[in-house]
Amino acid sequence: MTDSSRRWWAMAAISVSVLVVGLDLTVLSLALPTIAATMHATTGDLQWIADSYALVIAAMILPAGLLGDRYGRKRVLLIALVLFVASSVWCAYSPSVGELIAARAVLGIGAAAVLPMAISVLPVMFGEEERQKAIAVMAGAIFVSYPIGPILGGFLLDHFWWGSVFLINVPIVAIALVAVTFLLPESRAASRPGLDPQGVVISSAGLAVLTYGFIRAGQSGWTDALALATMVAGAAILAGFVWWERFAARRSGSQPLVDMTLFRVAGFRWGTLLMTFVSFAMFGLFFAAPQYFQDVRGATPLGSGLRLLPLIGGMLAGMAAASRLTAAAKLPDGTLGNPRLNAKLAVAAGFLIMAAGLAVGACTGLGSSTGFAALWVAVTGLGLGVAMPAAMNAAVGPLTQERSASGGALMTAVRQVGATIGVAVLGTVISNGYTSRLSLTGLPSATASAVRGSVAGGVEVATKLGSVPLLDEVRSAFIHGMDIMLWTCGGIAIASALLALAFLPGRSAPRPPAATAPPERDEAQLGA
C-alpha cells in the first residue's frame, strides 16, 4: 500500500469514527417518547438523559485534546471508541433511568475525545494541497449522520425495543476500531506537554456551566433565574480560564492547556467563528425540520429522515465543486500555483447560497409540497458543502503538529457551545412565533396549555378533539415560527458571508517559522 493510499484509508477510518458520534446525536430524540412510556420517566428525567451527554462533552473536550498531544492521538482515539461502544451497550440495556443517565454521561466522555482527535490528525497526515479534500470527507461523514440517524432509528423503533437505537453504534465502532488500529499512524507532541490541572478544572467547569445555562434557557425561558445565573457564572469562569492560560503561558516551567495565541491568527480565529455560525444555523434547522415533517406533514420518523436526504445530496455536490475550485493548480514545472477560488470567496459564496436556500424555505406555507421542501433543503445543503470545508481548512491550517489535538479541541469546544446556543436561541424564536399565532378561544386552560407547549402537543389535542380548524391553526402557527427561524438563519448566513469577505484570509496561514516549529517526528512515530 502506498503512503498516499494509506493516508486516505486512514481518513476513511476517521470518518467512520465521527459518523457514529453524529448518529448518536440524532437517534436519542426518536427514542425519548418510548423511553418515557417504558421506564415511566418524567420530563425532568428525559431532559437529563439528553443533557448529561452534552454537558460531559463540553466539560471533557479540552482535556481530551491535551491527552492526545501528550500520550498519542491514535491511542486516545482508540480508547475513546472502546469507551463509546461499551457505554452504548450499557445505554441499551440500562434497567433504570438513573443508570441510563450515567451511561449517557460516560458515552459523552468517549464522544468528547473522538471529535478533537479526528481534527488533530489532519495537519499531521495531509499537506495544504490535500487537506481541504480530507476535511470535506470528514465533514461529509458528520452531516450524513444527521438524516441517517432518524432513518435507522425510525426503522429500529418500528421493529425492536428502544435500546436498539444505541446498538447502532456497535457494528460501526467495531469497523472504526479495526480501521484505526491498522491504518492510522500514531503521532504525538515531540515535547510532551504538561497536564495543567488548574486549566483542566477551570475550563471543564466553565464550559459545563455555560452549556447548562443555555440548555436551561431553551427549556425554561430566557427569564429563568437559574438559566441566567448559570450563563453568567459560566461566562465568568471562562473569563478566569483565559486569564489563567495567559498567566500559565508567561510563567516559567509551565505550559497552558490550550494555546490562546491561536486566536491571534486570522485564519484560525475567523475560520473557527464561521464554523460556529454554520453550527448555530444548521442545528436550528435540524431542530425544526423533523418537527415540520412529522407534526405538520404527518411523516413518520423514518419518513422525516428520508426527506432530509436532499440536504446530503446538495452538500456532497457543494463539497465536490468547492474541492475542485479551491484546489491549488499544478503548474507545468510541478509546483503548486494559486487556486481558482480562494478560501475567502469560497466561504462567502457558500454562506450566500445557504442564505438563498433558507430564504426560500422561509416562504413555506401550510400548502407547500414535499418537492418544495426538498428544493430549499438541497440548496441549503449545497451552500453548506461549499462553506464548511473551506472555513474548517482556514482554521486547521495554523495548527502545528506539536499541539494539533489541543487546537482541534479548542475549535470543537467553541463550535459545541455555538451549537448549544443555536438550539436554545432558535428554539425560542420558533416557540415565540408559534404561540403568537394561537388564539385557542373556548379551550379549557389545561388543554390550551398543552397546545401552547409544543406543536406535537397541539396536534395531539386537535386529533383527540377531532377539530380540523384547530389542527390547521396549530400547523399554520408552527410554520409561522419556523419561517421566522429560517429568516433568522438566513440573516446569520449573510452576516457570515460579509465577515468572511472582510476578515478571512484568502489562503491558509503558513506554519510557524522554523525557529519555533516543533521537531520533526521520526518514522517510528508515523507508524510506518
Image (cartoon, grey):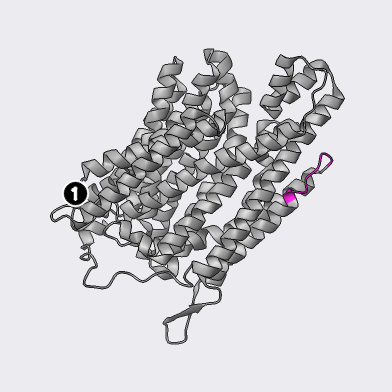
Q: Decide whether residue 366 is among the magenta residues.
A: yes
* Vertical comparison of 322 with 337: above or below: above
Q: Position of residue 238 (x, y in %)?
A: 35, 44
Count of marks placed on residues = 1
Please report the residue visible at 69 percent of the width from the left and 52 percent of the height from the top: 358
Quick check: 326 above or below 416? below
Percent of width and height locating residue 315? 61, 55
Name the foreground residue: 203 vs 56: 203
The N terminus lies in which quarter of the figure? Answer: bottom left
Residue 376's place in the image compared with 399, above or below, is above
Magenta portion: prevailing SS class? loop
Left or right of residue 361, residue 238 in this image: left
Residue 57, given in percent of the width and then of the height, sits at 40, 38
Q: Which residue is drawn at the image coordinates 55% and 34% (left, top)? A: 222
Residue extending farthest to the bottom is: 333
Whether residue 218 appears in this view of the structure is: yes
Q: Is residue 504 magenta?
A: no
Residue 167, can we see it?
no
Residue at 41% in and 61% down: 268
Residue segment shown in magenta: 361-367
Quadrant of the image occupied by residue 319 = bottom right
Q: In this rendering, would 260 be left or right of 131?
A: left
- Quarter holding the C terminus? bottom left
User: Residue 391, how many percent across, how many down?
Assistant: 49, 61
Task: Give the labeled residue for mark 1.
Answer: 194
Q: Residue at x 70, y 29 (%)?
A: 455
Closer to the camera in the image, 269 or 61: 269
Amino acid, disc 1: Gly
Q: Secondary structure at mark 1?
A: loop
